[in-house]
C-alpha cells in the first residue's frame, strides 16, 4: 500500500511494509533521520523510498537510524505546517485534531500513523521558539542536556522506542568530508549552512562530553 506525503511529495509505503536489510532489526521498524541544511530541519521516516529520494534528489542529509520503533503500539502521527515548513510528531489525537482544524497544520500519510511508540528507550522532545517553533526529537541524553544552552527548551519524554538507533555523521549525496564538492543542486548558502551545522555539533559534543 502506498500514499504520498503532503509535506515532501514523495510516495510512501505503509510503515509495516518497509524493510531495510542493512539497518533492520528483527521485529522492529527503523526510524530514518534526515537533515535539510537549507531549512535547518530534521525529518524522521520509516519509508526507505522517501529517505532515498530526499537524500539523492532533494539535498537532504542522511543521519542514520534515529531509533527502532515497535511494529505496533501507540500510534505516532506526523503533521506538517506549510507556512512554517515544520513537522510535528505526536501521539496526542486531540493535538492532531486542534492543529489540523484550527492552526493550518496538515496530516501526513493520510492521517494514519507513521510509526508506533513503545519500549524502554526514551525519546525526548525539544522546542526552539526562536526557530519558527521548531521541534527536535532525540534518544541522546547528552544532546538533550546540551541543546538548552543553544536556545532549545526541554519538553520531556514524548514517546518511546524498543532500541537505540545507529546514528552516523550527516552524509550528503555527492558531498565528501573536508572537500569543496557539492551535490548537483546545492546552493552556496545551503552548503555553508551544512558546514556550520557540522562544525557546531562537532564542537558541541567535544566540549560537552559527559
Image (tube, rainbow, N blue to C red):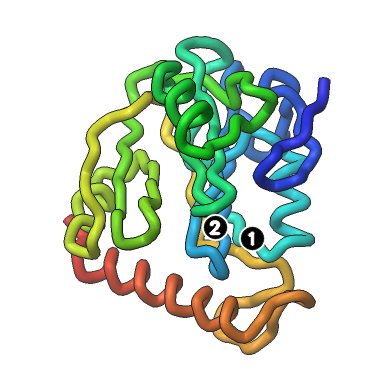
Q: Quadrant of residue 23?
A: top right
Callout 1 crowding tier (Cα within 10 Å): few <14, some 14–19, many ≥20: many
The first of marks 2 and 1 along the sequence is 2
- Please give left or right for residue 193 compared with residue 186 in the image: left
Position of the N terminus, as image quadrant, is: top right
Look at 66% across and 81% down and name the residue there. 187
Q: Is residue 64 visible?
A: no
113 left or right, relative to 130: right
Whole-number angstrom distance, CA of label 2 to CA of label 1: 5 Å
Find disc 2 in the rendering and name its residue: 35
Q: Position of residue 95 (x, y in %)?
A: 40, 24
Tell whether label 1 touches label 2 (CB within 8 Å).
Answer: yes
Query: Residue 42 location, x and y as percent?
Result: 51, 52
Using the image, determine if residue 141 lies above or below residue 56: above
Disc 2 crowd rating (10 Å Cα; few below 14, some 14-19, many 20+) is many
Q: Residue at x 54, y 64 (%)?
A: 39
| Mark 1 element type | loop
Q: Quick one: quadrant of the C terminus?
A: bottom left
Relative placement, left or right, of 153 versus 13 is: left
| Residue 35: quadrant of the picture | bottom right
The residue labelled by disc 1 is 60
Amino acid at each position: 500500500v502506498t500514499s504520498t506525503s503532503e509535506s515532501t511529495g514523495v510516495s510512501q509505503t505503509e510503515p509495516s511494509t518497509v524493510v531495510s536489510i542493512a539497518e533492520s532489526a528483527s521485529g522492529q521498524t527503523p526510524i530514518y533521520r534526515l537533515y535539510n541544511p537549507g531549512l535547518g530541519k530534521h525529518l524522521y521516516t520509516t519509508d526507505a523510498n522517501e529517505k532515498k529520494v530526499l537524500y539523492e534528489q532533494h539535498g537532504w542529509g542522511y543521519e542514520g537510524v534515529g531509533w527502532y520503533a515497535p511494529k505496533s503500539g501507540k500510534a505516532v502521527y506526523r503533521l506538517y505546517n506549510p507556512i512554517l515548513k515544520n513537522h510535528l510528531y505526536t501521539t496526542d489525537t486531540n493535538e492532531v485534531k486542534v492543529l489540523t482544524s484550527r492552526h493550518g497544520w496538515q496530516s501526513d500519510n493520510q492521517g494514519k500513523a507513521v510509526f508506533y511508540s513503545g519500549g524502554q528507550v526514551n525519546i525526548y522532545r525539544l522546542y526552539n521558539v526562536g526557530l519558527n517553533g521548531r521541534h527536535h526529537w532525540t534518544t541522546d541524553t547528552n544532546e538533550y542536556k546540551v541543546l538548552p544552552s543553544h536556545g532549545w527548551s526541554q519538553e520531556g519524554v514524548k514517546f518511546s522506542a524498543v532500541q537505540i538507533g545507529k546514528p552516523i555523521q550527516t552524509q550528503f549525496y555527492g558531498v565528501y568530508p573536508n572537500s569543496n564538492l557539492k551535490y548537483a543542486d546545492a546552493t552556496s548558502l545551503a552548503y555553508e549552512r551544512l558546514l556550520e551545522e557540522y562544525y557546531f555539533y562537532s564542537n558541541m559534543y567535544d566540549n560537552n562530553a559527559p
